[in-house]
Amino acid sequence: MSIDKETARRVAHLARIAVPEEELENLAQELSGILGFMEQLLEVDVEGVEPLTSVSPMTLPRRADVVSDGDQIEKVLKNAPDSREGFFAVPKVME
Amino acid sequence: MTDLFKLTIAEARDKLRNKEITAAELTESCIGAVKASDALNAYCVKTPELAREQANKADAMLAKGNSPDMCGIPLGIKDLFCTKNVNSQAASQILTDFKPEYESTVTARLWDQGAVMLGKLNMDEFAMGSSNETSIYGAAVNPWRRNGSDKKLTAGGSSGGSASAVAADLCLAATGTDTGGSIRQPAAFTGIVGVKPTYGRVSRWGIIAFASSLDQAGPMTKTVRDSAIFLNAISGHDNKDSTSAPFTVPNFETAITGDIKGKKIGIPKEYRLDGMPDEIEKLWRDGTDMLRDAGAEIVDVSLPHTKYALPAYYVLAPAEASSNLARYDGVRYGHRATLKSGEGIDDMYARTRAEGFGDEVKRRVMVGAYVLSAGFYDAYYRRAQRVRTLIKNDFDEVYSTGVDAILTPATPSAAFGLGEMKNKDPIKMYLNDVFTVTVNLAGLPGVSVPVGLSAEGLPLGLQLIGRPWEEGEMLNIASVLENCADFKTKADKWW
């Protein structure tokens, strides 16, 4: 399956990666190449085969639903590009 | 004794315990070697002060007696591991100056046992690559060079800095991580031993995530015995990683007896690729003979879905990566793009990620977003997961016939030159993982052992794939290969 320029634009948006208009054509070609490689999977008969989501047959362990950690505002914010009054700061989200 | 930095873990452990050397002396010797190694670009962060402090602590532990095996052992740590207050960037621009407020479980265990950190090691960005060339720090360089050539070669990837550092004696051993071959391929390219443990053997907590159902940390060492010692130090259940197995960890070092009489070794016919170089074929045959001569029974086995492992991997790993890397949005840590007037939060995300991620990371994140998107999820992602089941079933079937381990080449070639793959199709680079990626998909343990030299004088490795949770037996068989091959050659020092 080949990817056109519009699909490349949509994929870049889904991935939240800005791609300049003039690079979209190239990106489309590159993605088409990679997806072509993946198309070998279509040869495999997977009828009735369960998808593998975990290699070991473990059930996820549960723990008591209690607070076990926290109260580390300073540490949590230490690497933030912008923080104010104990919060992460971002550009205005709502108009 | 000079040149202490050349010691193995086992040798250093014994000398430290016998008071022949101190951790401080050993560490100082390594710091000197690291200092003089910039041409290899193996270390991206050096931490000599921290190392000296940890070495003094180790000497105090050693003085009390009963010290752990790793006490006083100087190590290099792949940049993918979060280390408290020390830059941990996964060799990415997007994590510029990120200094974690916490320590990964693997490194925390090592420091608790008295090990010493010399610094952080170069790698492909977010562990995505097979040549270390996607690193923001530039490529790590292989200490090995072709006969009569001074062309710089790749140390492999993604754990290229780890491989280069161990092979060049810039640490006694290093941590690596392996999602599709990132420990075993660089180990093979540099003539060292690299182990990818069974999925769940080692905690992933605090290791920057790439593809969580495939990622596993492991040792990169000068000998098989060192890998056993190192693996014991980092294995075991961790409450902070729900996929870490609640099993008791056996002693891997005492499992190395050198006795493999009657062990059944499988040779999978599907790993004999068209156009495989003769010297790789020969290496594989030589390795088979070594194990047979040591008393193992050699059997032909079939893993019929091998061919589909790479395409399945290159659906699943990018899909998981696109989810894991969604966290790099310029909000909580790392790089944030400077906004122009009128730009909003969506522009901030998209430009932050465009500026912060390198080309290969962007490519994989976008492929992942595509295969997970509405309309394609079943066709690609679900199908790849089903193929993964078939690949795992192949191994289950072989092991159910009593096979103890499977022997394959580790890589389809010796180390290639830096820049040689630059203008090639990305798929060409992905083919480096052809022998290793099945092991991650099936969650099995694998080890790469140096067995010979190519016609050009470069190291070549073989891979042993073990039964799940049987790293001990796998390392025992690996030790036989190591002894028979007697691979003692080191790269001539030019750096």
Image (cartoon, coloured by chain):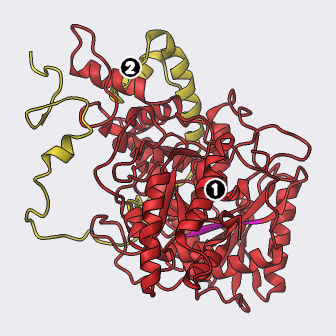
Chain colours: A yellow, B red
Kind of residue at disc 1: Leu
Q: Name above or below for residue B64 compared with residue A11.
A: below
Viewer-proximal residue, B445 or B56?
B56
Residue B495 location, x and y as percent?
74, 44
Kind of residue at disc 2: Ala
Give yes or no for residue B447 being in the magenta stretch: yes
Which quadrant does the N terminus of chain B fall into?
Answer: bottom right
Viewer-proximal residue, B397 or A43?
B397
| Quadrant in the rendering for residue B337 | top left
Per the rendering, the mark at residue B263 is: none
Residue position marked by numbered label 1 in the rendering: B170
Give yes or no for residue B167 being in the magenta stretch: no
Which portion, as a residue range, is magenta? B445-450
Q: Residue drawn at (31%, 64%), measured in percent from left and top?
A: B241
Residue B258 location, x and y as percent?
71, 87
Q: How far, Cα to Cα, is label 1 from label 2?
A: 40 Å
Chain for disc number 2 = A
Q: Secondary structure at mark 2?
A: loop
> Does residue B92 show up?
yes
Residue B23 location, x and y as percent?
53, 70
Per the rendering, the mark at residue A18 is: 2
Q: Secondary structure at mark 1?
A: loop
